[in-house]
Image: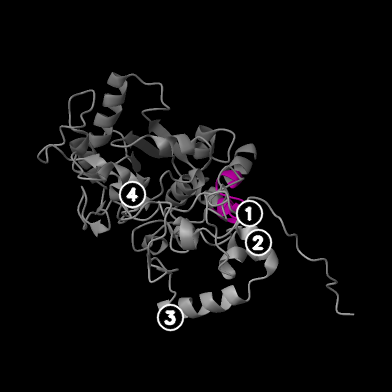
Amino acid sequence: MRRANWACRASGCAASCRATVWRKKLNSAAPLNLLWLQSGGCGGCTLSLLNADCRNLFDTLEGFGIRLLWHPSLSEESAQEARRIMADCASGATRLDILCLEGAVLRGPHGGGGYHRTTGGDAMMALVERLARVARHTVAVGSCAAFGGVTAGGCNPADACGLQFESDTPGGLLGKDYRAHSGLPVVNIAGCPTHPNWVIETLAALASGLLDASGLDAFQRPRLYADHLVHHGCTRNEYYEFKASAHKPSDLGCLMENMGCKGTQAHADCNIRLWNGEGSCTRGGYACVSCTEPGFEEPGHPFAETPKIAGIPVGLPTDMPKAWFVALASLSKSATPKRVKENAVADHQVVTPAVKKTRWK
């Protein structure tokens, strides 16, 4: 019962019913073996994972029927023991149900993967390929593993790429036609870093057999979070509606028009499923950089500036025709209440809402 409560908390406050279904499906199932590898990246997704809404990460995974074979930062095994675990998985001596990779694959120099070798001397790229061929599910944790991410930025001297994408182009290390033994492509839990509960809920869905191809979007991200926009639930939405914009980071207004915010375009539920149950980038006063999207690391403009043409932001909200945006923005600004207009360019509420009777009589 205690583990069940942790499982519900780990999958988000709105997912208790799903957690109940998962547990029923897992009652008679053998535990799934999970192997987690780290490649070219900062390790930030693992650090984020340790902030999951659960008391004990390992017990939570076990509660969902997942046994962690090895993690480079969290496991106690020696290098020799870790190599044995990987060899057993590659040979089939140990069943590999879920292969997770954190960090981009480093293919350089000259496509040999020599820039990243394991303690056994093998190229990490070759090891990942071998393990992906036998894995029941293959999961890219973070935007680096999914699309190349920050590691592939600039001139990309390490020839970094994602498992099945190179930025927004299908391919990557495993190729666009790769399918794990489950029939699924690489599941891309994109984010920089990933929200910890995106990871746990995705792993739980895989373990229970509730995640199929229909549960992935065009970039193979789990729709459980990618069907939302960062804009959804943003505390600055009133300012957005009236196009009352911030002009500097400390302002309360909408960050889209001047400060580079892409929350109306970024696929994630950051303002619905809050980080650490408390905040998000926009709630902390920083613009959304759309870190779940391929190529976010090189937007072509400074992160905290909004590129414009003739005064109109280039990056318009998802599904919003330009003509409609211009018309609505003009109308909204003309109707902006004094309270919203003045608070938008202040670092605290300077005009409070008017007190007004709300009953009809």
Observer-nearest residue: 77 or 104?
Answer: 104
Mark identifier at residue 181: none
Span highlighted in magenta in the image: 8-21
Among the 4 quarters of the image, the one containing residue 76? top left
Q: Main secondary structure of the magenta part?
A: helix
| Tag 1: amino acid | Ala
The residue indicated by pointer 1 is: 346
Say which label, 3 or 1, has the lower sequence index.
3
Residue 263 shows up from this direction: no
The residue indicated by pointer 4 is: 297
The residue indicated by pointer 2 is: 342
Mark 3–mark 2 distance (CA, rounded to whole Å)? 27 Å
Q: Nearer the viewer, mark 3 or mark 1?
A: 1
Q: Are circles 3 and 4 on residues that touch, CB within 8 Å?
A: no
Q: Nearer the viewer, mark 2 or mark 4?
A: 2
| Tag 3: amino acid | Ala
Say which label, 1 or 4, has the lower sequence index.
4
Mark 1–mark 2 distance (CA, rounded to whole Å)? 7 Å
Q: Residue furthest left?
A: 110
| Residue 40, above or below 197 | above
177 to the left or right of 42: left
Q: Are circles 1 and 2 on residues that touch, CB within 8 Å?
A: yes
**Is residue 102 found inside the magenta-colored segment of the image?**
no
Q: Position of residue 165 (x, y in %)?
A: 26, 53
Say which label, 3 or 4, has the lower sequence index.
4
Secondary structure beneath disc 4? loop
